[in-house]
Image (cartoon, rainbow, N blue to C red):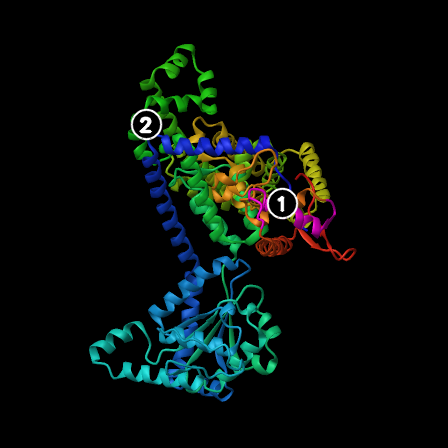
Amino acid sequence: GCFVFKPSTKKRRLSEKTAHDFRSTSCDSEDTELRFVTYQSLWNQIKFETEQIQEDLNKQLLDNLVSFLSRSHSDFHEKTTKWTCRMKFREIPTAALVLGVNVTDHDLTFRSLSDVLQDNITPYVALLEAKDCPGIKNLMQKLMGQLMNCDIEVDSMEDEDCVQVSRNGIRCSMPSLISWYESVTKKTDSETPSKKRNSSSRHWQSPPVVVIFKDMESFTTKVLQDFIVISSQHISELPLVLIFGIATSPMIIHRLLPHSVSSLLCIELFQSLSCKEHLSTIIDKLLLTSRFPFKLGEKVLQVLINIFLYHDFSVQNFVKGFQLCIVEHFYSQPLSVLCCHLVDIKKRVYSLSHDQCENIRRLPSFRRYVEKQESGKQIELLTNDSFLKEETQKLLEDLHAYHENYVSVLRCLHVFTSSLPKYPLGKQIRELHCACLENRVWETEEYESSLQLARMLNKTDLLTMLQQCVEILMSSSGKEFDKAVEKLKEFLTQFQNLEEASQEQDVSVSSQKELQKKTDLYHLQKTLLELKESRRSKKLTKFEMLRFEVVDYIDRLVRKYLVPADNRTLHEIVYFNAATVLRGHLNAAPRTALHTALNNPHWYLKNQALKCDGGCISNKAPDICIVYKLHLECGRLINLVDWLEAFSTVVTAAEEPNADAASSDQVDDIIHARFIRAVSELELLGFIKPSKQKTDHVARLTWGGC
């Protein structure tokens, strides 16, 4: 059934007012164009960075595929023993490319693969989709059409099992494809030496024909079987290479194809990078960096991550959601003009108008900041625009410095927490980032558990982590970490010079192994309590004391630099926190939209003549809207005759009575036909269904709040 929940009038009026405020803010603001230019510049930088990341992540996979195709082609070209053996068994070189269930990201991967192959291996690449290949003749049509760069139409009246389709003098069959390939390669061989030299620098001589099945699971078994069997019979004449795009598991090949067909394929498996690893890299490069001034709040980031993890696993959709956040932020926040790079802050701040200064004074974080100042400074901040601009510049520069320091210390903390058993603060850095944005991370139980576990690390792990932290802080652009680097290097020196008794080291190592073995919560707490009691009864060794000092120093860095962004002044300028708005854009509400369209058609049609007040029904509304409103007044079963009479009454309400009986009967037939069509559409949408109790009645399927 389809359940309609009509939103309350108060809530709707509030949302309409908010939308109107956003529109007026965006349209009437003095710096609308500057905000748009700033958004465009920022998004172009982020888009370029995203494409570069995806290219780098796919590079290894694409290189492996190119190497595979090169080997397959060289065997054919040189007629080696390996190719002769393969030709004897009629095997087709096949790459099984496992890409994962994030099918919305596959198009980008296949486009990149096609471009790389056409640049380095062969110009003959065909990309086939299951929706375009319901039969073998459709497959051959698409294949030859793409290879020959022409459009070949297929007569739907022809036999589905027939492979040969004739259109515009081209026969879509394997012999025709082989003849075309031989003519094209001979033409290339007969070119002038200079042209041949230029072409051979990019493509191999007698380049292979690569056929990519983008969604193998969606192809019918018969189509795949017929194509593979036909192709294997001509493999000695045509250097064909297949690439199967697989979203689930390589076992799907053996489920779709019987052994007699799969044995005709020489399969090599290729695995793409996990979509979760891909997302972690995107977040690391786009969000955990000070290169881009725009930031996402904790709830907004959690919405995007939840959609990724629980809906589609699509990195492309995550990036689109990120773009939507940027658009919404620059559209709805009048002060987003200050969301710019550090070098542009001074110029932007001193060009602010009086109204924009008032907008700064209205920010909640700025109000809290003013309340903490002395009375004299408070008066200056609230009345003197020049003084406010100077203070705003300092605060924004401090905010940029906060981001630089935050990212560096966050990475240091992640070095420690990611190596602990059970990962109290999460294994991925994005989980740790969300925890730090949400509240003061050092006040959480997970953080306390992490510190306790860190105080039991062995010497080798501790030295490795300290070295990584030194490298992170040294590579940071923040200027406040010189003393921290010196302190960590001092710890490293002390550890290296420290000579412990082997018995004490064995105790520490065994404690760590014990923690790793007993990973359930009960045994973990029990072990921690036992170690705590044992420490009370015996004196700490030099190693343990030094280890405590290291953990306490990292704790002090965390408390100093990982303060939640909500506590920073002017964070509203660079942080987007409207999770509800984002959720409304990304999470579709089809029931609400459908009810609004049928109950208030003027909302979508933008026709005020259709607007009705007081629950009345306009005869100018579409037929389905009239039928829908009438059905809301009925009970569980609806009498079709009564429904038709009510519909006819509404439709003819504004018409003058006609004395001509024949004309009246004709009008009744038209109204009857319109009614039947509207009821059929309502049934298709799932609002009603035929009733088995009474033949002249239909059953209503939706209830509540209408």
77 vs 613, left or right, is: left
Q: CA distance from mark 2 to mark 1?
A: 65 Å
Label 2 sits on residue: 349
User: Residue at horizontal 32%, vertical 79%?
Assistant: 205
Secondary element under disc 1, as helix, strand or loop, is: helix
Residue type, numbered disc 1: Thr
Q: Quadrant of the C terminus?
A: top right
Whether the magenta-drawn stretch holds residue 638 is answered as: yes
Q: Label 1: few (<14), some or many (≥20) within 10 Å?
A: few
Image height check: is 347 above or below 231?
above
Label 1 sits on residue: 649
396 vs 88, left or right, is: left
Q: Earlier in the sequence, mark 2 or mark 1?
A: 2
Of the numbered discs in the image, which one, if any, rests on residue 78?
none
Confirm whether residue 98 shows in the render: yes
227 vs 374, left or right, is: right
Q: Which residues are magenta?
A: 635-659
* Relative image position of residue 659 (x, y in whole percent): 58, 49
Judge by depth and name the residue closer to the eye, 270 or 387: 387
Residue type, numbered disc 2: Val
User: Residue at horizontal 35%, vertical 69%?
Assistant: 118
Image height check: is 216 above or below 504?
below
User: Residue at horizontal 37%, vertical 14%?
Assistant: 383
